[in-house]
Image (tube, rainbow, N blue to C red):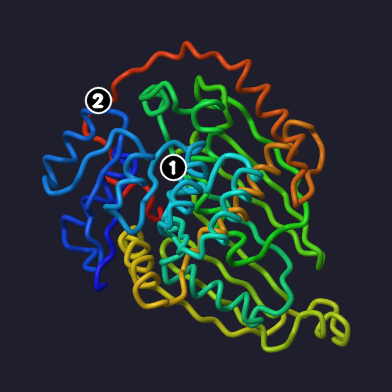
Amino acid sequence: MDKIRLGIIGMGNMGSGHLGYYLNGECPRIEITAFADTVPEKLKKAAEKLPSAALFNSADALIESGMVDAVLIAVPHYDHPAIAINAFEHGLHVLTEKPAGVYTSQVRRMNKAAKRSGKCFGIMFNQRTDPLFARAREIVRGGQLGDTKRLVWIVTNWYRTQAYYDSGTWRATWKGEGGGVLLNQAPHNIDLWQWIFGMPKRVRAFCSVGKYHDIGVEDDVTIYGEYDNGASSVFISTTGEAPGTNRLEISGTKGKLVLEDGKLKWWRLKEDERTICAECKDGFVQPECEYEEFTAPAPDGHPEILNDFADHILDGTPLLAPGEEGLRSLSISNAAYLSSWTDDWAEIPLAEELFEKHLAALCHDENQTKKQHRVSGPAEKLSERWKVRW
């Protein structure tokens, strides 16, 4: 086999965007052979672009068709795990959109199904393909920054208007999306946070519901995390500030990294700060350091993740974004919600039953009479929507 037969489940904005990469010739080891969607109009549009593909009105029908080797799941968040589990049980490889799911217990079940199946499992964490984030991970995880001290990420350039939130009845609802900025815009950033810096042991979070928009989920978040080694992290995100900021700063005992404006800046201390602090006789010394700066064009990571997925299936190369790792960023966002709901610290691993109890109550109480409006103008390009915004 020199190509994988791929079926796309969900032909909305994300599924259609991935079809576009294929039609542009950007995925040479993939052949799209089927589409599935519950909305006939979306299937019709997909068929017009790729008449050779088979059409199915449900995910189950596509999975059971025998026409695909793998599926790409691009449906609402709650449905990711159930569809993935069914695909694994039918011997298919799975690539899912982010987030892995809405709550951690369903994602853990999905991960177990992937392990049982022995099939490839990937997740669309496309920002891992950015060379600057990859270099930052190499520096931190390789020990070149010494013992980690602090991560501070201000990512407030996910600006959205009220028209965006009014564009669908499912959008910005607990029942439809499972949350707001943490579940929709920020999963990429939270994934990179843990991918580079590691998982916190507990978080204290403040999630403001409808602070800048007429919505019932959070649009402004501040998370404080603590680590076993004494390090800390602060993560701030919102869809209600303009102009926004995207600035990641990481400090350790051997220096500091700053990622901003498409640059990675590295201040490397000539001696470990802990040694300087303990042994230097000058109380006001400024430790000597060397400075390096990196720039690299940010790729459109979506086709890179698709190609990485295909290479893994065909050649056995390591996955850049294994699907099982989706549990990590979701654990942080679930813990942030629980902390905000209970006005207390939330430990990781999460108290799953307590989290699901709170989420179920929010879904039950939610106003389901939200009007749907059509957003004027063309939809935002997929390549622009989820790229790194400096």
Q: Secondary structure at mark 2?
A: loop
Image height check: is 339 above or below 149?
above
Place of residue 374 in the rendered image (x, y in percent of width and height, measured from the top left): 29, 21
Q: Quadrant of the C terminus?
A: bottom left
Q: What's the amino acid at mark 1? A: Pro
Q: As drawn, which residue projects farthest toward the top?
A: 369
**Within the image, what quadrant is residue 300 found in?**
bottom left
Give me the residue at 62% from left, 18% from top: 364
- Of mark 2 and mark 1, the one earlier in the sequence is 1
Q: Nearer the viewer, residue 43 or 144?
A: 43
Circle 2 Cα neighbour tier, 10 Å, few/some/many (<14 / 14–19 / ≥20): few
- Nearer mark to the viewer, of 2 and 1: 2
- Left or right: 295, with 148 as reference point: left
Residue annotated with mark 2: 376
For residue 390, say whether it is visible. no
Q: Is residue 108 visible?
A: yes
Q: Position of residue 285 (x, y in %)?
A: 77, 80
Q: Which residue is mark 1?
A: 243
Query: How far apart, in angstroms, are the residues tagged by discs 2 and 1?
Result: 22 Å
